[in-house]
Amino acid sequence: MSELKGRKLVLGVTGGVAAYKAAELVRLLGKAGADVHVVLTEGGARFVTAVTFQALSGNRVWTDLWDPRMDNNMAHIDLTRDADAILIAPATADVMAKLTHGLADDLLTTLCLARDCPLLVAPAMNRQMWEHPATKRNAAQLIADGVTLFGPAAGEQACGEVGLGRMLEPEALCEALIGFFQPRVLAGRRVVMTAGPTFEAIDPVRGITNSSSGKMAYGLARACVQAGAEVVLVSGPVSLPMPAGARRVSVRSALEMREAVFAALPGADVFIGVAAVADYRPAASAEHKIKKSGAELSITLTPNPDILADVAGLPNPPFCVGFAAESRNLDEYAEGKRKAKKLPLIVGNLVQDGLGGDDNLVVLYDDAGRHPLPKAAKPELARAIVAHLAGLLPKV
Ligand code: C5P
């Protein structure tokens, strides 16, 4: 994935134990395509050396305001001139206090004062330092000044105490950064989604299910969160990590899924049905495991409710989006489903292009016609779908 391709980031590393995690962060940001320039404070250099960051970022590491390597000796301006953001991770209580008051007594704080790009801060400190009224004041002031805070997280600390103050993990910081650069087209919107397959029990150990990796739904939930939405993901059984910031309601059967969807629906602006809901369920599920007898066994199946059609059929439905996975005649079948279920938007894809794969060929159908999306990896597809649906929502 190259979700930070073309982004130039200045990463400030200050003197906290979590500085060792900044090394992993540099690696992840680089893997996501970012061009990372590390500025190491004197305190930061006590934990991790400049050589480590240089090797991982492939760029010179800056430590000194008076570094003669900078052509015009204007490191405090040049380094952030074309940067997309400065991220300070870990950010100590001390650097937060300096930033709050506009102090500029080293390269990093001078850069922050002289910048015209966003400043993102990932606090990392002992829980008592974080809870101190001075730090609280500083954090509130930084937010009021337009600085974005990532974290801190709660958990075990280097000092052995447990509480709020841990730096977010490098993966979470990388996710937060990718999210930071996305347009907030769903800010203030509440989105309810279904995901994954459903599992319809035959007996306590057997059942009928559909093949669905859940990747598209989870990718879409992530894109909705990054676009600023509050997301509830009603998910059948899948083994995928939950997108940061979304709430999962785990279900198994179609009936459970329907119930959870209707419970989550009040106040929803958008409902997206991505789940591969089983069309049928056994009319009765045996209480005990059915024993093998050698004779033929018949299972009577009864149709499941169509969750999406039921939501779209409500008197004041949220904006409903469906998915149509077809193996042929995509236009005809997808548009037919859109009309039958009364959906303003349906996302069609040809299953021969890889159900469960990482790439998908997708066409959107709405009242204005068909809109093929360029072939892309799922995260980009998810963003394109979110951008399209956001454009169709009634204005608030
Ligand atoms: O009719 P079909 O199953 O092909 O429609 C697919 C769309 O309808 C998907 O958006 C799927 O999540 C939704 N659906 C549903 N409940 C069902 C069957 C499908 O919500 N029982």
Image (spheres, rainbow, N blue to C red):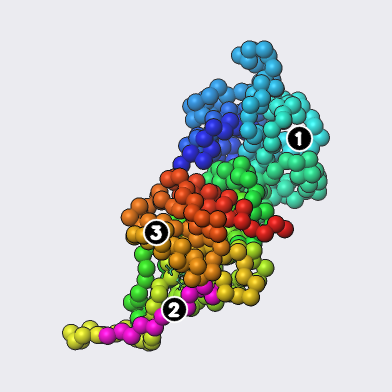
Where is the C terminus found, in terms of image quarters? bottom right
Please report the bounds of the magenta region as a residue range.
298-311
The residue wearing badge 2 is: 304
Magenta stretch: includes residue 87: no
- Tell me, yes or no, if residue 195 can be seen here: no
* Amino acid at pointer 1: Leu
Residue 330, numbered circle? 3
Give the residue furthest to the left. Answer: 294
- Secondary structure under tag 2 reads loop
Q: Earlier in the sequence, mark 1 or mark 3?
A: 1
- Position of 203 with respect to 339 (left or right) is left
Image position, residue 208 (x, y; %): 35, 74
Please determine whether, in this image, residue 288 is positioned above or below residue 72.
below
Image position, residue 173 (x, y; %): 58, 44
Which residue is at a point 60% across and 44% down the rendered structure image? 182
Image position, residue 380 (x, y; %): 50, 46
- Position of 74 with respect to 326 (left or right) is right
- Secondary structure under tag 3 reads helix
